[in-house]
Amino acid sequence: MLKQHIKMLTEAKKIQKSWKPQNGDRVYFCNSIRIVINIGTCWFLYYADDSNRYSICAADALKNNEHILWLPYQIQFQKMAAKMPTWTDTRPTNVLCRFWSWWRDSDWELCSDDTTLEQLWLCFVMKERFNKRWNNEIEKWEEM
């Protein structure tokens, strides 16, 4: 499922453009998941499973590197959802209720035994913020 998640996030250009790198962010770089750590003026991409690292010395260079893909955590998707400009009530319980209603009423071809909650939140954010739906056949986000 990681392969599909990577493809979905690669195609979610507006989400990638909205990234503001922070300590602890997760990225996909050189076929592996890495953790972003800022030390002074430099950003380091650590492997999640060892101390090997890659450094970039400017946040813009990190954000604009076409080989680095931001992998938002579920909490980051939830924060994106809570920033919907048309919502008047963005309390966590209301965001969760909206997510549940969307999931319950959706025609789900994406769901399988290995679909992650992060993928579901990504789909929810893409629908609510950008009016797009993931098409598994062509592996692209489409206007709804």
Image: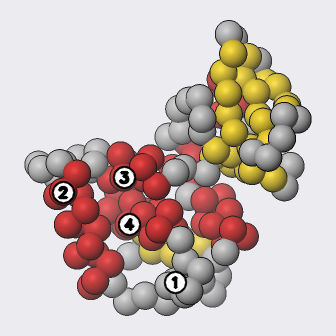
Locate residue 55 relative to residue 35 in the image: left or right. right
Q: Amino acid at mark 1?
A: Leu
Which residue is denoted by mark 1 in the rendering?
A: 110
Q: Are marks 3 and 2 in contact (CB under 8 Å)?
A: no
Q: Which mark is residue 93?
A: 2
Q: Circle 3 sits in a helix, a strand or a loop, which is it?
A: helix
CA distance separating discs 3 and 4: 9 Å
**Label whose residue precedes the other's in the sequence (2 or 1):** 2
The spot of residue 120 in percent (x, y) is: 45, 70
Q: Is residue 64 visible?
A: no
Between marks 3 and 4 in the image, the one whose residue lies nearer the viewer: 3
Between marks 2 and 4 in the image, the one whose residue lies nearer the viewer: 2
Q: Are marks 4 and 1 in contact (CB under 8 Å)?
A: no
The spot of residue 137 in percent (x, y) is: 63, 87
Among all residues in the image, which is located at the extreme left?
88
Locate residue 35 relative to residue 82 in the image: left or right. right
Q: Amino acid at mark 4?
A: Phe
Q: Amino acid at mark 3?
A: Gln
Q: Circle 2 sits in a helix, a strand or a loop, which is it?
A: helix
Q: Circle 1 sits in a helix, a strand or a loop, which is it?
A: loop
CA distance separating discs 2 and 4: 15 Å
Query: The C terminus appears in which quarter of the rendering?
Result: bottom left
Q: Nearer the viewer, residue 101 or 132?
A: 101
Query: The N terminus appears in which quarter of the rendering?
Result: bottom right
Which residue is denoted by mark 4 in the rendering?
A: 124
Please report the residue visible at 22 percent of the width from the left and 51 percent of the height from the top.
92
Between marks 2 and 1 in the image, the one whose residue lies nearer the viewer: 2
Residue 76 lies, with reference to residue 43, above or below; the image says below
Which residue is denoted by mark 3 in the rendering?
A: 78
The spot of residue 30 in percent (x, y) is: 86, 49
